[in-house]
Amino acid sequence: MAESWSELNDARRRIRERWPTIWKLRVTPRAMAHAALRIAPGATVLDIGASDGRFGGRLAPGTAYRVLDTDPRVRADHRSLDEVGEASCDAVACFETIEHLTLAEAFALARGCARVLKPGGRLFLSTPNVHHPWSYLRSATHKTPFCYDELGGLLELSGLLVEDLLRCHRDAPLKALLRALAYPLHRLLGTDYAKGILAVARRP
């Protein structure tokens, strides 16, 4: 993991200079849809923790889609990042997985993603938003909560450049109006209605 806690805190501080609060992050309806629109046809994509592989169905025809999953019940092309060649991927997707890891494991994952990405390749990584009252706590298999600034700091310490941090939420029009009216209360309580965070990071 990071050489020291102060190193991680410094990285978090640098992220907060760009996005001072959770409410400064733009909202995107769905992490997978946001990522799929930014992956070019013909790209080589690695999906980590892919589960049923539904992200692959969102990608353009001709995309080389590969799955990495440690669950033996899931059909996968790889069981470990060690099996993936260096600089072999145009994009890596990792949705709702990193929170199931310890902090040391999360650093190993991020550094592994940086290794397998081609220069200029992008990582799309989502995790529950800890500012949402139950998004992170609803699963007993979650091990590490990541605030947006800590997630960004971890990625930058792993050799990636964070291009964007977004909140993930989709509402029907009436609910969206109610959310807007409740916005001052969310700010007062330090909570958020968006359930997820999406980080977009690039290998230099």
Image (tube, helix red, strand yellow):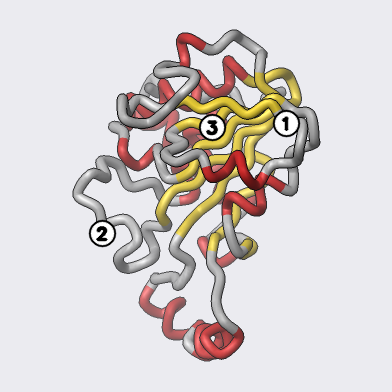
Amino acid marked by disc 1: Thr
Regarding mark 3 in the picture, which secondary structure is present there? strand
Q: Is mark 2 on a helix, strand or loop?
A: loop
Residue that badge 3 annotates: 47
Q: Mark 2 points at which residue?
A: 138
Q: Which residue is drawn at 60% across and 60% down?
A: 25
Q: For the residue marked with disc 3, what is the amino acid?
A: Asp
- Eyeballing the image, is 105 above or below 98? above
Task: Estimate the x, y position of residue 154 in percent, counting from the top left.
Answer: 47, 33
Report the Cα–Cα distance between label 3 and label 1: 12 Å
Position of residue 26 in the picture relative to residue 180 (left or right) = right
Mark 1 sits on what residue?
63
Q: Distance between the residues labelled 2 and 1?
A: 34 Å
Is residue 60 left or right of 132 when viewed as pictured?
Answer: right
- What residue is at 67 percent from the left and 32 percent from the top? 122
Q: How far apart are marks 3 and 2 (CA)?
A: 24 Å
